[in-house]
Image: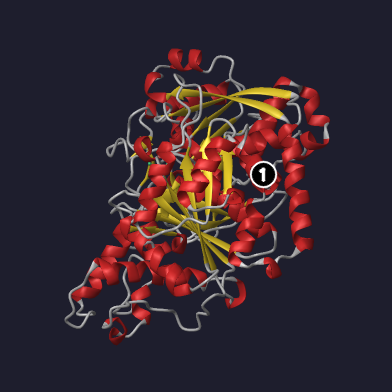
Amino acid sequence: MPPNESQHGPGFLSQFSASEDTGEHFSPVPDGYQRGRTKFVVVVGTVMSGLGKGIFSSSLAKLLKDKGLTVSPVKLEGYLNIDSGTLNPYRHGEVFVLDDGLETDMDLGTYERILNQNLSRSNFMTAGQIYTEILERERRGGYLGRDVQMIPHVTGAVKSKLRQLAMTGPKGKQIDVVFVEVGGTAGDYENGFYIEALRELAFEEGDDSTCFVALTYIIEPAILGEQKSKAAQLGMKRLMEAGVQPHIIACRAKNAVTTKVAQKISMFSNVPMRRVFSMHDRESIYVIPDAMRAEGLDREILSILRLHDRVDTVAEDRARGVWSGFASRLAATRDHKVTLGISGKYAALRDAYASIDKAVEHCGIEFGAEVNIRWLDSGDVESLARASSALDGIDALIVPGGFGSRGVEGKIQCVELARTKRIPFLGICLGFQVAVIEFARNVLGWKDAHSTEFNPNSGHAVISELPDQKRLEGIVGGTMRLGAQDVAILPGTLASFLHSGASLVRERFRHRYEVDPAFVTALETGGLAFSGRHSQHPIMQVLELPLSAHPYFIGAQFHPELTSRPLAPQPLFMGLIAAAIAQREPSFAQTALGRRWVRSAAPTSAATSRA
Ligand code: GLN
């Protein structure tokens, strides 16, 4: 690592000589940065959080991306954590892992899915990252005796990072539009420096460079039965007190915002009526981009930022065609119906499994299937009898990832039932590991089989932490395998069938333990196939049972849910839902979609012959 580079980020401070920050305007600009080339759309919430700022920003970004513009979103988090890796999914929703291994919050998943675009660590900023970099530089004497201050140093760092992000366009070009989502709401203590930094940025970048969008909320108290604008007005005031005049106001509300309310908002925040938008609840998040376009939100953004001449109308027509095809599948009647059980520790909280929920939704839309999810608390099903009643009426089972021992025995029981009762099964990460444990215990007869995560003294530690393995792979510092890696797929297997014969696929990992290679031969001889592996090392990444043993039994050491997109549902999920439909309706296997996704008795011998 170069001496002036922080371990927590791209070392943004390293590019600027110390003399640049001796003035009052600490405003470093990357080499080659062209002011005015990149435009910034800043989305700030008022009134309350939880309004779907991420969905709003990503839908808006999608509209501009569809017009042929390059876009890159960034989420600014006020918290002091460096990343989201240590956050409890109960409190904060799932941890979303990016291709480059950064652990972020679930909003980045929303951006990746809606934009159909991979993001990286430059798309996620926390106060903790910024302070750490600044304090590390301070200790190295990087501020030449100056007192280090919130303004200009912290705000300068934020601006600098945003401009660096602007530099990351394809072929070394600047991004057309950076979408900045400020976490929390205007007036929060912890995001104040972000709002100040953005105010400064807008000033420095000049006219037509930055568009502030205030996302507010119009309350409609049941006792009054009408919409009230005062909370929104007060929220807007907080933003204006911080020196930010919004250009656009988007009003979240239960019902369409009335003209009277829109007029009040317009008048009291200096925003013309044509720039006050009703963003009321819709039946699905996927119709939001079209709803925004119908109201002219994209047109106003183009005018404010003077972007009309960068629009590619041919690209826009094409993108709109693709999206409306998707939207029509969304609206089509659901001919099939399946019930999917998901057994997890955080069964109480959908947000904790947001990406799984979405991946399943993508498949449901693709197949025209209504997929009802039954959340099973694996902590409640420690016995086989309890598991059996919990799984009653279930057409498919997912055992998702997790850490810690609570509920592990329940998950093993669920896998045993899925295996013996031929219920289509997908094990994810910990779910993959418990499938190995279950097989070792109940097929190979190693009753003490376990993972060293839960029993360090097991005589058959089929899942174990293998530091040597990690060293070979060059995993340093932390012991987690994080981020995307290539997975080599064995030909002739279910995994290969699902991936249309691709020999390498790229998937995202977040785990510490893995299958101990010492047991692989015995497991394979017993009938468990490892059909996906690390391309160089003996690391098992996909497991499956042959068709002769089970219609659909597959597990992944990675997290397939993180790469599923509305326009490209993830194959392991597609296979699972297809198998579930085919179990209920055998004729489904003969349809075009069925032939693509349901493995039939075609030769799949390689899956078993490898042993
Ligand atoms: N606890 C397991 C491990 O660390 C599984 C992790 C997960 O499911 N994400 O390997």
Q: Callout 1: 10 Å neighbours few (<14), some, many (20+)?
A: many
- 436 to 12, vertically: above or below: above
Please tell me which residue lies in front, 364 or 70: 70
**Where does residue 467 sit, x and y in percent of width and height?**
33, 56
The quadrant holding residue 174 is bottom right
Q: Is residue 151 visible?
A: yes
**Where does residue 400 sit, x and y in percent of width and height?**
48, 35
Indicate the quadrant containing the C terminus: top left, top right, bottom left or bottom right: top right
Indicate the quadrant containing the N terminus: top left, top right, bottom left or bottom right: bottom left
Please tell me which residue lies in front, 194 or 476: 194
Which amino acid type is shown beneath numbered disc 1?
Answer: Thr
Horizontally, residue 336 falls left or right of residue 148, namely right
Horizontally, residue 442 falls left or right of residue 609, namely left
**Where does residue 533 sit, x and y in percent of width and height?**
54, 52
Look at the numbered disc 1 and give the secondary structure of its residue: loop
**Which corner quadrant of the figure contains ligand 1?**
top left
- 564 to 71, vertically: above or below: above
**Where does residue 229 sit, x and y in percent of width and height?**
46, 36
Q: Is residue 559 visible?
A: no
Q: For the residue with label 1, is its CB less than 8 Å from the closest atom of ligand 1?
A: no
All told, the count of numbered labels is 1
- 524 to 304, vertically: above or below: above
Please tell me which residue lies in front, 264 or 223: 264
Residue identified by numbered label 1? 493
Q: How is the image coloured?
A: secondary structure
Please tell me which residue lies in front, 86 or 410: 86
Q: Residue at x 54, y 35 (%)?
A: 357
Horizontally, residue 451 falls left or right of residue 115, namely left
Q: Residue at x 29, y 81 (%)?
A: 21
